[in-house]
């Protein structure tokens, strides 16, 4: 069994500890509520923590209103608490406040489960304070402890997914992998790309953050990462088309199969070189790179010319792969241009 403690786990534990210290100093009861709020409020980025607080204010306002109405109209029996929770969840979801639903439910339950003394202003303030302490403790810890280097994390994920796609693009044309293993790798790549896209949404949220030192550089990197993800998607599409159609192409035309394999190999090298250029691990001569790209264009044109006059069956097998190669080539070309602009800026610093 793998045992791994990540930064977010540490921050969640620290947020709970800070919450319990604050509630203990103030002397609030039901500190468990504040601790649960801290766990629910811990977010993967600073901006998401900030946005979460804004949502909490709105959603808990809705929850507080319905909790008080429920107490005064139908009491605080289990059925009425359940009914108020259902109504509040429905309203929060309709308002787009899905992320804070759990915290709203916690607020409603803590308010409606009043003591024998009943509900008064002091009681309401104490219950809301428990939630507020938990949420703000999570925010403070998120800002001060292990602030995540989102760009480094995202590029690491992109690089891992890229290595997987490059590996498949090498072995599929040569048929050096079993079909079950290939299908398993396909699913793994799809999961990796989905994780990359999800994490890109997190880093995109940071665009309005006040904690970014060099905003212009950050925004330029966002554009580069967006194109890197697009390259991953195009490569995955090419992999699926090769798996589906390459065997049929070899049966009907070995010449076209040879051109496709050559293109895939060149495209793979091109993709690897662009990432290495981004990491400043290699220097790509721009003139030599232009010659390489022109050679790829010629090969693509040769493939298209070879299809002229072909029957419909050949087109149905070759065209999806050819189209995927062309789309990947165009996306890699865009990515290289942005990476070279970054390289020039880095040299001027």
Image: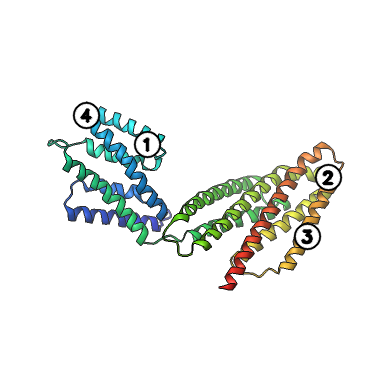
Nearer the camera: disc 1 or disc 2: 1
User: Which is more toward the observer, 345 or 258?
Assistant: 345
Q: Which quadrant of the view contains residue 245?
A: top right
Nearer the camera: disc 2 or disc 3: 3
Mark 1 or mark 2, which has the lower sequence index? 1
Circle 4 residues within 10 Å: few <14, some 14–19, many ≥20: few
Mark 4 lies on residue: 77
- How far apart marks 2 and 4 lie (CA) works out to 75 Å
Mark 3 lies on residue: 294
Kindly check if marks 1 and 2 are in contact, taking CB atoms under 8 A apart as contact. no
- Depicted 109 relative to depicted 225: above or below: above
- How far apart marks 4 and 1 lie (CA) works out to 23 Å
Circle 1 residues within 10 Å: few <14, some 14–19, many ≥20: many
Instruction: State the image coordinates of residue 220 (x, y, percent, origin top left).
Output: 56, 60
Instruction: State the image coordinates of residue 54 (x, y, percent, origin top left).
Output: 36, 47
Mark 1 lies on residue: 92
Mark 2 lies on residue: 307
């Amino acid at each position: 069994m793998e045992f791994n403690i990540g930064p977010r786990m540490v921050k969640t534990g620290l947020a709970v500890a800070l919450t319990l210290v604050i509630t203990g100093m103030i002397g609030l009861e039901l500190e468990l509520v504040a601790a649960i709020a801290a766990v629910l409020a811990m977010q993967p980025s600073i901006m998401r923590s900030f946005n979460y607080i804004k949502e909490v204010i709105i959603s808990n306002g809705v929850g507080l209103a319905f909790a008080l109405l429920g107490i005064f109209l139908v009491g605080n029996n289990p059925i009425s608490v359940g009914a108020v929770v259902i109504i509040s969840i429905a309203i929060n979801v309709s308002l787009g406040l899905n992320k804070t639903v759990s915290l709203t439910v916690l607020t409603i339950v803590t308010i409606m489960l009043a003591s024998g003394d009943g509900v008064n202003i002091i009681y309401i303030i104490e219950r809301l304070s428990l939630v507020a302490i938990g949420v703000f403790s999570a925010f403070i810890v998120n800002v001060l402890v292990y602030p995540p280097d989102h760009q480094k994390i995202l590029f690491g994920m992109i690089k891992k997914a890229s290595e997987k796609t490059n590996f498949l693009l090498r072995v599929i044309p040569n048929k050096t992998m079993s079909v079950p293993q290939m299908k398993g790798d396909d699913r793994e790549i799809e999961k990796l790309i989905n994780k990359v896209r999800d994490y890109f949404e997190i880093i995109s949220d940071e665009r309005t953050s006040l904690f970014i030192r060099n905003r212009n550089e950050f925004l330029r990197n966002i554009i580069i990462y967006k194109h890197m993800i697009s390259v991953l998607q195009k490569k995955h599409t090419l992999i699926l088309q090769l798996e589906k159609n390459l065997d049929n192409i070899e049966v009907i035309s070995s010449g076209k199969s040879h051109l496709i394999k050559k293109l895939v190999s060149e495209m793979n090298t091109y993709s690897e070189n662009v990432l290495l250029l981004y990491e400043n691990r290699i220097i790509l001569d721009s003139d030599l790179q232009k010659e390489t790209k022109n050679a790829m264009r010629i090969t693509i044109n040769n493939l298209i010319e070879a299809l002229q006059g072909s029957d419909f069956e050949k087109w149905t097998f070759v065209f999806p792969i050819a189209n995927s190669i062309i789309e990947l080539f165009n996306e890699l070309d865009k990515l290289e241009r942005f990476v070279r602009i970054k390289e020039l800026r880095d040299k001027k610093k």
